[in-house]
Amino acid sequence: MNNFLPRVFYLLATLAWALLLWRHPTTTFTAACFSCLGQPFYRRLRRKSRHWSNKLRGTSSPRLAAFQRALLRHMPLYGYTLALLACMTTPMAALILLVAPQASSGLERLRELQTNNFQIPPEWLAPLQQWRSILAEYPHIEKMINDFFNDIEALMNDATNMLLSWSVDVLGGTMSVLWILFLFFTLTVLFTLYSRLIYIIAGRVFVLPQALLRRFANAIHRALRAVMMGIALVALIQGFLCGIGFAAAGFKNAAFWGMLATLTALVPVVGTAIIWLPLSLSLWFTGKTMAAVGLILWGVLAVAMVDNLLRPLFLHHGINAPFLVLITAILCGLNAFGAVGLIAGPVLLAFAIQAVEESNKFYIRE
């Protein structure tokens, strides 16, 4: 009875927060993930703050010492807040300043290329029509292929339209966008500041030792770091390399094409080739042979090699699972949760692996 009543109060407090945040599950989950990623940085700031506080003790007047202690006591919060603001504003500023001005004309050029079949001559289209007639005999395969390419086209169009709308909303000061950003920022800071209290409450509610909870938190942290390094960072590197290749090949709106390459880098197997291969064909069939060959070589030797080498390395380093299992978890997460599934899939996989490892320890003890 002594433990039952406090658990009820803890659960009621959790329910109260759930009712407050139930309309923003994606923002809450993303904030919790970023808080988990930023925990080591915040702890490092706290250690440095305590170190300098002890080092300055007794070296100045009492009034100056009190001011220094107050400043050092708040230094971790200020430093973490500034770092989080930099992480939020830098990508948004890059998108608004570099990509948004090119997005409208770039989207028009993309639709023009699609309408003209990327300048492919009719004699080259004849074999493709033959393949389509062969696939027509197998409706399931044809439907699967058509759905795949339709999904890719919808992804690029939706991402471009979303970029345009976001840039207009941010520049125009739309309250909904500002509210989501404010909520994400506030929740990330709160989750970081009260992480120790969250651990304590979770341990008391579920009767779990703190060491066990921290092992789960560390597993999720490694999974999130693997996602950031193996998926987000690799996609950004590939998009940047593609942008360099597009600019060198003479394409206007290179930043726009690089942004599309960054998005399609998440597609398994084909990845950025969805962008640079059709653009290479358009160069080839418009008489720019050297530029087309150079862009293809750049895509195969530079862009694709980054994906083949770095992505498995980063993902496997953070999540102890075969690469095929990781890709399956990511695809299932995307299918189940949308864009946030890119994070949720690996996190759930890491949680499941850690749960199995913890369960195996009990059987080993027996």
Image: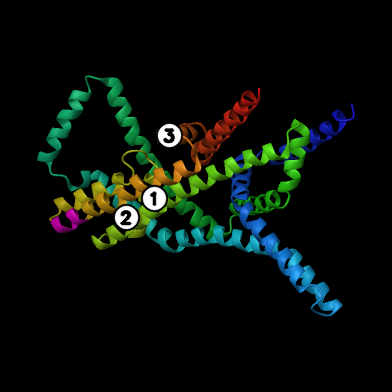
> Which disc, if any, is residue 322?
3
Q: Which mark is residue 262?
A: 1
Question: In terms of sequence position, does the residue under pointer 3 or pointer 2 come before the other?
Answer: 2
Of the residues under marks 2 and 1, which one precedes in the sequence? Answer: 2
The picture quadrant where one finds residue 104 is bottom left
Q: Are marks 3 and 2 in contact (CB under 8 Å)?
A: no
Alpha carbon of mark 3 to alpha carbon of mark 1: how far? 24 Å
Dot 2 alpha-carbon crowd within 10 angstroms: few under 14, some 14 to 19, many 20 or more: many
User: Residue 347 appears at what percent x and percent y?
Assistant: 55, 38
Mark 3 burial class by Cα count in 10 Å: few <14, some 14-19, many 20+: few
Task: Work out how far the residue at label 2 is from the one at label 1, CA to CA, in angstroms.
Answer: 8 Å
Callout 2–callout 1 Cβ contact below 8 Å: yes
Q: Residue at x 14, y 50 (%)?
A: 285
Q: Quadrant of the N terminus?
A: top right
Q: Residue at x 41, y 45 (%)?
A: 313
- Which mark lies nearer to you, 3 or 2? 3
